[in-house]
Amino acid sequence: MKTMTRVGVGIRTAASRDERIVGQIHVYDGAGKGKSQAALGVVLRSIGLGIRAEQPTRVLLLRFLKGPGRTYDEDAAIAALQRGFPHLIDQVRTGRAEFFGADEITRFDRLEAQRGWDVAKGAIASGLYSVVVLDELNPVLDLGLLPVDEVVNALKRKPDHMEVIATGRAAPSALLEIADLHSEMRPHYHAAAKENGIGGIEIYTGDGKGKSTSALGKALQAIGRGISQDMSHRVLIMQWLKGGAGYTEDAAIAALRQSYPNLVDHQRCGRDAIVWRGQQQELDYVEAERGWEIARAAIASGLYKTIILDELNPTVDLELLPEEPIIQALLRKPKDTEVVITGRCKHQPTYFDLASVHSEMICHKHYAEKGVDLKRGVDF
């Protein structure tokens, strides 16, 4: 998404402001799902933009508390990235393969955390990477496995061009103070989802950053899971309110389709303009319905393992689409089809009650509010 407004509900699909060239420090925390997915979405966008500009983007994925011997949701997504974009992504995993609390910390845990941090320090100081993801750094600091002051001081000295993304629950205050962006993933639970036993419906909403980027992470995860099972997991990315040109999501999706032909389908609809409540045009309704007909048929077909309905929430909130057909389509979807719905909304649609995962992205801090320009491949 290019630029978002905080007044009412609308999506700006054209931007003319200058782009920033200075990298920022992102922190994704909270108990909700989507933190690591959002980081991977930023990685995919950055890689796609680099390919388009013929300036390869190098990425380091440093994963704390995720040692070998255990499978994690993002493993498949990272495998898909590494297979599709060889030589662009380095990955380091540290820690043991089980969860533990503060009263269960061992010398091994401290050594593994330090080993990972030594790699991270070297990568940050080298300036060789465009994006450094410090996955689960927040709980490592919260558990006292690394000195917070040392980490904060190293991040303060990062090269200007580098984006640093820290994820995980319980980010310490000292890290949040130097963060340029802080988005909290807050979970919501719906009894109706358990009662209906649907499963496989995820919703990412709220004013914070991480909604569409989390969805891109889910697309990667589906492709990677299919590869690991020697199967073809097809993905549909359907985008509403994005009828303009020049989205960096397009570059990311094009890069995916180049690496994985016939696995990713992409459709979008809408005008190249903001759609404001009370100022909807006839074309807005026509385009929204066109997009829904594509999505509805895809959900019913069973051909896709993952279907991303990007910006469906504001489309419904603007009353460009009715809720009931969406509810019925979700109730009848094949069990093995995952549907991911994104976008902010002022009034929560009824289909939220069907979500097995519902993360609200709370914006605590965003560098745009300080007048910092947005950056292609990271912000839009």
Image: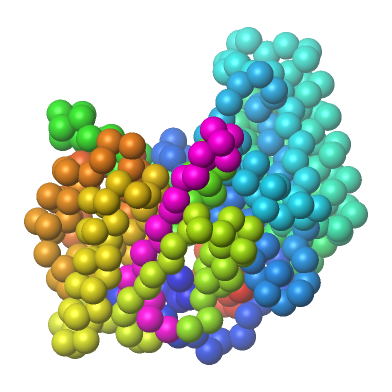
Q: Read off the magenta span.
A: 226-244
Is 349 placed left or right of 15 in the picture?
left
Seen as rendered, the residue at the extreme left is: 324
Res 38 visible: no
Whether 236 is among the magenta residues is: yes
Depicted 79 relative to depicted 263: above or below: above
Measuring 84% from the left and 44% from the top, which residue is drawn there? 121
Whether 151 is among the magenta residues is: no
Q: Which image quarter: residue 355?
A: top left
Is 146 placed left or right of 295 in the picture?
right
Depicted 50 relative to depicted 144: above or below: below
Is 263 placed left or right of 80 in the picture?
left
Q: Position of residue 284 (x, y in %)?
A: 22, 82
Q: Nearer the viewer, residue 203 or 256?
A: 256
Q: Position of residue 245 (x, y in %)?
A: 48, 83
Depicted 27 relative to depicted 290: above or below: above
Q: Which image quarter: residue 112?
A: top right
Q: Position of residue 2 (x, y in %)?
A: 48, 75
Res 322 visible: yes
Measuring 17% from the left and 56% from the top, which residue is drawn there? 326
Q: Nearer the viewer, residue 128 or 334?
A: 334
Measuring 42% from the left and 84% from the top, which residue is drawn there? 244
Q: Position of residue 324 (x, y in %)?
A: 9, 56
Q: Nearer the viewer, residue 359 or 53?
A: 53
Depicted 303 relative to depicted 380: above or below: above
Q: Nearer the viewer, residue 100 or 305?
A: 305
Measuring 24% from the left and 59% from the top, which residue is drawn there? 297
